[in-house]
Image: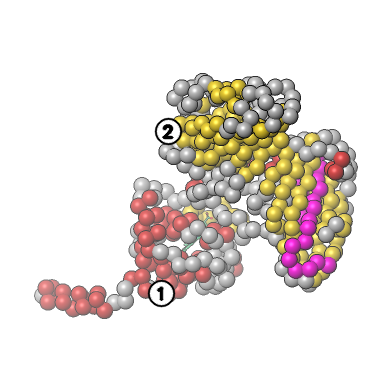
Amino acid sequence: MLPHRYPLLLSLALLAPPLHAQDGEQLYALYCSACHAPDGKGATGGAFPPLAGSEWVHGNPKRSVAIVLKGLEGPVDVAGKSYNLAMPPQGAVLGDDQIAAILSYVHSAWGNKGGEVKRDLVRAARSEFESRTEPWTAPELLKILPLEKKPTALANLTSRIYKGQWVQTPDFSKIEAENVEEEHHGMIDTTIAGLNQDFGIVWEGDFMAPVNGEYTFKLDADDGARLILNGHPVAEVKGLGPIGEKRRMSEGKIALKAGANPIRVEYFQGKGNQGISLGWKLAGAKQWQWLSPKNAQSQGAPTIPLLPKEDRTVIYRNFIEGTTPRGIGFGFPGDVNMAYSADNLAPELLWTDGFIDAGRHWTDRGMGFQAPIGENVVTLTAQRFLPPSARFKGYSLDPKGNPTFHVKMEGQLLRDAWAPGENGSLIRTLSLTGGSSVLEIPLGDNPEVTPAKSVSLSPGKPVTVTYKLN
Ligand code: HEC
């Protein structure tokens, strides 16, 4: 009798709404709400993690697609709380359309600010992760799909790094900075210096006040720090000591106009650990908002596995194995990486196949050098060859995060710019201004990678070389 039923089934199928028009809210109620609760706040009073306000469903939707397809297990932090549970994979049960519908709902419900999640994205992710049989762990997933950082209220932030031994916050206007950088994430974070001991940082930028009103700022530091807004001292943590002690913390109030208010934060590290925390709130508000990595403790270490984002170069400023203590790592898009030594004033390492696991190092700060993830590390020069007068003057970043290093010599300035090229290559542009001396710059002697052994650089005549890695 079966054949007779075909036409009926067929017409039913045709009458059914197209799959992408499936109701995400209904599907959510069926497949997710038992654990994440109908209001997205996490079932059984928050014993399960929330989806409302979760950083995991903020930004790139591929991350949540990956979680629904393959599940997630082990320790994970969601909206400031830690969980250690397991979410079963649902990729076998749910079709691409259904996952797209559910996640379009999840990413835009309960105040979440994402857009529609497309079926094609789900399909592509399904085939990308096809061979995966185990649920994700949070660190694994973050390596390939890092969380977007929420911008802070700080704009146009720069940091200046100083070196010296102090027991009080010094007068930084009398000391010369070693290094000036832009801090695109708007974070007041001591770990950017990549130093453990005896340094100072001064951040300057604009505090973008949302409205006119009275603001309270809360400052804490290991060791000392000072907060200045619109030229007025607002809070100060004095002398040497740890973070997190009530008697050292400092709170101050100031009336601000909506819009940009110049802010300056001074910090010094003298003894033991490092860290700074800076929070603010409008009069009457309950919640503090943070300008530093949240709950920065001594050694305040953000957990950011470092991998280049799709089109932005990332930086790693900490000890890197194979170069000098002041090595700075750059992970370029296209999976080519470079470490520059601010001691030897030259690029020292090139490698592919994975940049650096910063999370590992930051939890183990100061405990030796971090090896690059990739194995095919090429050493370039590994020695200082510029004249003794040469001094490192920091580096600047272009909008894509690509660095230009600045080195000053008697009457001359050397600029050393790096950017990703095609097919896993790196393009280096060297230029010299001032004076008349010609500089001989060694490029390394690995014929497979380096274009030549060295180049001669004359003032006003930039030279571009391409390193081939793949
Ligand atoms: C059986 C319970 C259960 C179901 C059903 C479930 N989840 Fe989860 N989900 C969890 C648990 C538990 C975690 C945290 C896992 C861990 O601790 O590693 C989690 C984590 C997540 C996360 C990342 C952390 C967060 O809270 O933002 C997302 C996103 C997520 N689930 C989405 C979904 C979606 C969408 C569905 C429905 C398709 C769903 N989950 C169904 C239990 C579940």
Per the picture, the main secondary structure of the magenta-coloured stretch is strand
Q: Please identify the quarter of the rendering in which residue 17 is found.
A: bottom left
In this figure, which residue is indicated by the disc labeled 2?
470
Q: Quadrant of the N terminus?
A: bottom left
Classify residue 190 as left or right of residue 22: right
User: Alpha-carbon neighbours of circle 2 within 10 Å: few (<14), some, or many (≥20)?
Assistant: some
The answer to whether residue 149 shows anywhere in this view is yes
Residue 164 horizontal/vertical position (percent): 82, 35
- Disc 2 residue type (three-letter): Asn
Q: Residue at x 26, y 79 (%)?
A: 15
What range is drawn magenta here?
255-279
Q: Is residue 358 visible?
A: no
For the point 78% across and 56% down, the residue is 263
Give how far across and how far down residue 153 sits, in percent: 70, 60
The residue tagged with tag 1: helix, strand or loop?
Answer: loop
Q: Quadrant of the C terminus?
A: top left
Tally the marks.
2
**Which label's residue is closer to the chain start, 1 or 2?**
1
- Mark 1, Cα crowd under 10 Å, few <14 / some 14-19 / many 20+, is some
Q: For mark 1, what is the residue?
A: 23
Q: Position of residue 270 (x, y in %)?
A: 83, 38
Q: Residue at x 74, y 62 (%)?
A: 260
* The one of 68 and 224 positioned closer to us in this rendering: 224
Structural distance between the alpha carbons of marks 1 and 2: 46 Å
**Magenta span has 313?**
no
Q: Is mark 1 within 8 Å of ligand 1?
A: no
Q: Amino acid at mark 1?
A: Asp
